[in-house]
Amino acid sequence: MASGALAALSGAKTGRSPKDKRVVRDASVERDIWWAPRAGEPANGSPNFEMDEHTFLLNRERAVDYLNMLDRIFVFDGYAGWDPGARVKVRVVCGRAYHALFMHNMLIRPTEDELAHFGEPDFTIFNAGAFPVNRYTSFMSSSTSIDVHLGAGEMVILGTQYAGEMKKGVFSVMHYHMPKRGVLSLHSGCNVGAAGDVTLFFGLSGTGKTTLSTDPARPLVGDDEHCWSDTGVFNIEGGCGARGGKGWRVEVERGARARRPTPPPLLVAAATPSASASKPPKSPRSTPPSALAPCWRTSSSTSTRAPSRSTPTR
């Protein structure tokens, strides 16, 4: 663009496709997930649509075959979660530089030493979004499919080039794993005051978390995804992202922020109890948390070939 900013097009999909997202339902996660109803069952409001492992493997094979046909693919290794005791190692394998660059910004970039000792990832994303899924495959509802296999630690993207699917896929994984470690995952913005007082801004996407958490007088911890543990509040991500489009104005001020003409209200929660409160507020911890600084680190993406194994492993 004339301003010097990099613009990327995501094709027909300019937002997420929640009705095309599936989670493999097997014995390892059966009792831990609030599942959407099967055919004939009453609606319950759950967005967690199921698929079986066989269908996941079919889509995975399709994605890997597509990636292996490309002259060049991009691989990026990064972390989700700034607390070293709660972080998840993520590997992104994709066919578009735009996707690798997006996750290079959104994930926490390892230091050179961390990258050298990264080892096997906890979660791998195969993004073949430029290639459609076979819509006649079982469980499919269109030519788009975003498939998550929590047991195998893998995600497959077909039929959508919207980069936000990767961001929210990692967030879904954190929502699954963090409570099992006694950590509360939160869809919230977060900043911290001079006295170490942490404020969390809760709201759905587009309601103003990024705008309100970006305050010149309060250092930004993060604008969208956080965890609250016994040792503090930490950012899941390594950068900020705001979608541009009709009705949006995107600015850069201490990170990206997005505004709509009239954002709906948010629920604002101060993590430090008020001195005038008659009793402490309900929270997942008994003492006020501290903010674990998000920091900003650098690493690099590499180009390689996609793995061709037929059975997903961790």
Image (cartoon, grey):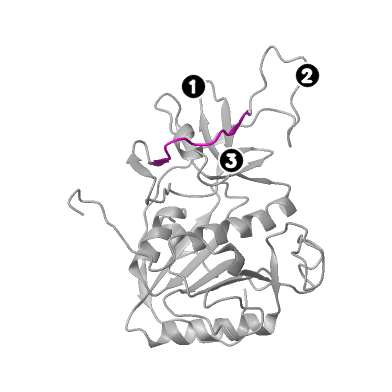
Q: Look at discs 2 and 1 and give the one toward the viewer.
A: 2
Q: CA distance from mark 2 to mark 1?
A: 24 Å
In the picture as drawn, the residue positioned furthest to the top comes out as 276
- Determine crowd level at label 2: few under 14, some 14-19, many 20+ residues with C-alpha closer than 10 A: few
Q: Quadrant of the C terminus?
A: bottom right
Q: Which residue is disc 2 drawn over?
A: 279
Q: CA distance from mark 2 to mark 3?
A: 25 Å
Residue at 52% from the left image edge and 44% from the top image edge: 224
Query: Pointer 3 and pointer 1: residues touching (CB < 8 Å)?
Result: no
Query: Pointer 2 and pointer 1: residues touching (CB < 8 Å)?
Result: no
Q: Is residue 289 visible?
A: yes
2 or 1: tag closer to the N-terminus: 1
Closer to us: 46 or 58? 46
Q: Is residue 76 above or below residue 253?
A: below
Verify whether residue 269 appears in magenta. yes
Query: Pointer 2 and pointer 3: residues touching (CB < 8 Å)?
Result: no
Q: CA distance from mark 3 to mark 1?
A: 24 Å
Q: Secondary structure at mark 3?
A: loop
Whole-percent x and y of residue 155?
A: 57, 71
| Amino acid on which the number 1 mark rests in the picture | Ala
Residue at 52% from the left image edge and 40% from the top image edge: 207
Whole-percent x and y of residue 137?
A: 61, 85
Q: Look at discs 3 and 1 and give the one toward the viewer.
A: 3
- Determine crowd level at label 3: few under 14, some 14-19, many 20+ residues with C-alpha closer than 10 A: some
Q: Quadrant of the N terminus?
A: bottom left
Q: Which residue is disc 3 drawn over?
A: 203
Q: Is residue 222 visible?
A: no
Q: Secondary structure at mark 1?
A: loop
Whole-percent x and y of residue 119?
A: 52, 68
Give, as a single range, the part of the protein colored magenta: 257-270
